[in-house]
Image (cartoon, helix red, strand yellow):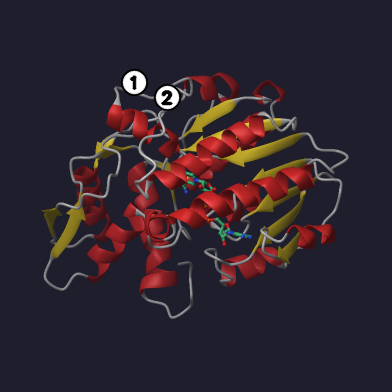
Amino acid sequence: MKKILITGGAGFIGYNLALMFLKKKYKVHLIDNFARGVNDNSFLSLSKSKNVKFFQIDLLNFDKLSKLDRDYTYIFHLAAIVGVKNVLRRPYDVLNKNYLLLKNIIHFAKKQKKLDRFIFFSTSEVYACTLRDFSIKFPTPETTKLSVGNSFEARNTYMLSKIYGEAMCVHSDLPVTIIRPHNFYGPRMGLSHVIPELLKQAHETKDGIIEIANTNHKRTFCYITDAIEIIYKLTSSKKTLGGTYNVGDEVNEITINQLGKKVIDTVNKQIKIKSINIDNDSPKRRCPSMLRTNKVVKYKMKTSLNEGLKKCYKWYSKNVFNSKEVSSI
Ligand SMILES: NC(=O)c1ccc[n+]([C@@H]2O[C@H](COP(=O)([O-])OP(=O)(O)OC[C@H]3O[C@@H](n4cnc5c(N)ncnc54)[C@H](O)[C@@H]3O)[C@@H](O)[C@H]2O)c1
């Protein structure tokens, strides 16, 4: 039985990756320190599954990794300081800790005897400064030259840590694949992302108004189970060794205002949108070119945004909005 290790395994993507690899009959080992992911009922039940082992350790502490095995087939590195609020509050930690987390897991990966692939989760934010300071192609290909912007801006630290991380992986002599996720969404993603934030506002509004920032910005959204299937196919292909791949939806680009209207339809209430201005340097547009990824995976998305929003609303209503259980940040 093949074995995989996921760092950040209690988080949004890590949890869903674990479910997928379990289904494919892998042994799944997870590392998390619950800095952001939470030990809710979903995670508890996952961690008690027969082929799952959970290590509650801080990956910053390299010595703790001695408890783990030496025969992983895949290592997925997802643990990182993420989220705009965290990044603005702790920019130095983002640079320092994201680097140290990656350095530790690369060092650990080099001790492995059967490693087929080391998968690093980068971000779509790597394109943000190029978009802001120069011109960029839409949909955006992985070959886009990356600009690193101004080091005085706290928000840039996340993107800097990921670009530096990509370069570390490429030069690590490990069999690497780099993933650049573009706006995955779904149940159990916490509250500090646009979709759960809007669902919460629409669910709770008393005056029939929801406030939305950056209504003219454009995004595409990719439902988590589609994203996970694409990532599974990408990382199990020999062709992707050494490559960098966008993962997201190239086709269904919408404005944040249109997203707000879809959220209102989902919640099924009479609600008006109040557009507010928040200058948080959020990229005005984000849309991945999936050409390179599609050449390998040939995947047709299964969950439309309308369906995905319904699934999210159902889950958030039950587990967060109308529940006392701690359910992700
Ligand atoms: N969700 C997206 O659409 C998206 C977009 C771009 C990039 N990414 C990248 O994908 C990865 C996973 O994202 P996510 O949305 O699942 O984030 P998440 O915050 O839900 O998961 C990250 C997990 O890492 C854990 N962690 C942090 N520091 C740790 C430490 N020192 N030791 C052990 N565990 C630690 C957290 O507790 C959390 O559970 C991240 O690296 C992120 O940068 C995600």
Q: Nearer the viewer, residue 268 or 253?
A: 253
* SS at mark 1 in the image: loop
In this rendering, the answer to whether 235 lies above or below 105 is above
Label total for image: 2
Residue bearing mark 2: 289
Characterize the local packing of mark 2: few (<14), some (14-19) or many (20 or more) Cα atoms within 10 angstroms: many
Residue behind label 1 places its C-beta within 8 angstroms of ligand 1: no
Position in image of residue 225 (x %, y %): 52, 45
State the residue at coordinates (55%, 68%).
38
State the residue at coordinates (27%, 58%).
198
Is disc 2 in contact with disc 1, using a CB cutoff of under 8 Å?
Answer: yes
Residue bearing mark 1: 137
Q: Is residue 277 left or right of residue 303?
A: left
* SS at mark 2 in the image: loop
State which tag comes first along the sequence, 2 or 1. Answer: 1
Which is closer to the viewer, label 2 or label 1? 1
Q: Nearer the viewer, residue 40 or 165?
A: 165
State the residue at coordinates (72%, 24%).
238
Quarter of the image where the C terminus is located: bottom left
